[in-house]
Image: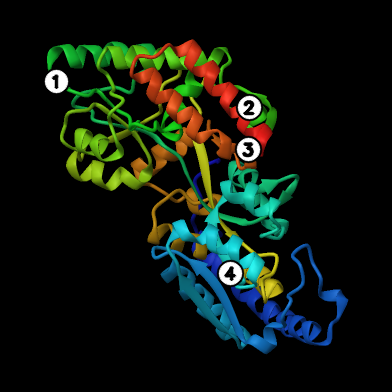
Amino acid sequence: MPLSGVPYGPVFLSPRNGASMRRTAKAGAAAASLALLLAACSSGDDAATTDTPAASEPAASSGTFTIWADETRTPPIQAECDKFAEANGITCDVVQIDFGDIRGRAVQGSQTGDVPDAFIGAHDWLGELVTNGVVAPVDLGANAGSFGEVAVKGVTYDGKTYGVPYAVENIAMLTNPKLSPECPASLDDLQAAGKKLKDDGDASLPLALQIGDQGDAYHWYPLYSADGGYIFGDGGTNVSDMGVGKEGSIKAAERLQAMADEGLLKASVTGDIANESYTGGDSAWWITGPWNAEAATKAIPETVVCPVPNGDSTSQPFIGVQTFFIPTKAPNALIAQTFLNDYVMTTEFMDAMYAADPRPPAWTESAAKITDPITKGFIDFGLQGIPQPSVPEMGAVWEALGLAQFKVATGEDPTKTMEEAGAAIDAAIAAQ
């Protein structure tokens, strides 16, 4: 996403104040239009329909607008939703649910009718959610240009947008400058520097990359893509072009095996072991996400973010897009759309979400104000990433590709292993 400075001065509004003034103006209009909308719902007026399905129960009858969110994001969402509710004479209830449980609850609730008016989630859920009719399209309208391009791509499925993105995340390479004074310019350079660290006894595990006995295709992907590996063609959307087992994936597997043979990484390394090795000063590099930045900088204050270096191709991390969704059967779907339009899609709200959980905002005006070098490092590397594929076929990929990674790292033939993994994925997709 573009990160340009925001001008300040007597003729410019700061992003926060500008958003507040715009929202104040919109809030008055929203209150009036919401009153009409409620009346339309009550009277059955077809003129109230939008891309988001009309509410099955009028908001005026329930009086409560409900959002599902996790522990971290509940407080900022509740604060903003309370303002919205007060302005419109309704009640807002943000129900706290573990993030890992939200998708299952939403899918099950779509069958039973036990759904909120909106919920947060990850964009890569879309394959399952759209296929099963769980979520409705959400029109970003004039605000579409206020989001980073990759965020909009992430919430787009079959040509329609299905949510309002609020944050993006990707992995990069946390680096200890005492062991690696410069970011490696290429994977060849990383290998050479890592081998020297190992030989000199300066780092017992130069590259902290979590694999484990099931493998970890997500954390491998920046290295995998750096040598030309891919999963599906056209940035992860063309499922008829499956890349596992093709030349790039085999080169990536050969590189992984060489690194394991040199002792730069180990198949047995889990997420916890990677954390301990880097924070203990035994690793020069840690391929991980912003969720581990605090632990890294607390232990190694000099920590910087480097891009995962390129090999034969460009390293591409997967981009995750955190999103607000509206269920197809939301009791107050039109109210939810109004809340997303007039309150969520503002700089003030996006700033509050970032303050609660400092992952890069999807809203470019908020992202442009970030000065923290660690966050900016993740953002910069993410510019060359692609949205994590959200197609249902990805369900057949993770286990097979992860196990292939583990097998290669423990010495099995890279070509045979990757070709077998590709065949397994093809068979699993055909059986879906």
Q: Residue at x 56, y 17 (%)?
A: 245
Q: Earlier in the sequence, mark 1 or mark 2?
A: 1
Report, in whole angstroms, how far the alpha carbon at label 4 lies from the one at label 2: 44 Å
Write down the residue under mark 2. 426
Residue marked by disc 1 = 202
Residue 343 badge: 4
* Element type where label 3 sits in the image: helix
The secondary element bearing badge 4 is classed as helix
In three-dimensional space, the C-alpha distance between marks 2 and 3, rounded to whole angstroms, equals 9 Å
Question: Which residue is rendered at x = 45% and y = 59% of the image?
Answer: 99
CA distance for labels 3 and 1: 43 Å
Q: Can residue 317 be seen from the camera position used here? A: no
Cα distance between the residues tagged 1 and 2: 43 Å
Q: Is residue 104 above or below residue 248?
A: below
Labels 2 and 3: the sequence-earlier one:
3
In what element is the residue under mark 2? Answer: helix
Nearer the observer: mark 4 or 3; the answer is 3
Badge 3 crowding class, 10 Å Cα cut-off, few under 14, some 14 to 19, many 20 or more, is many
Residue type indicated by callout 2: Asp
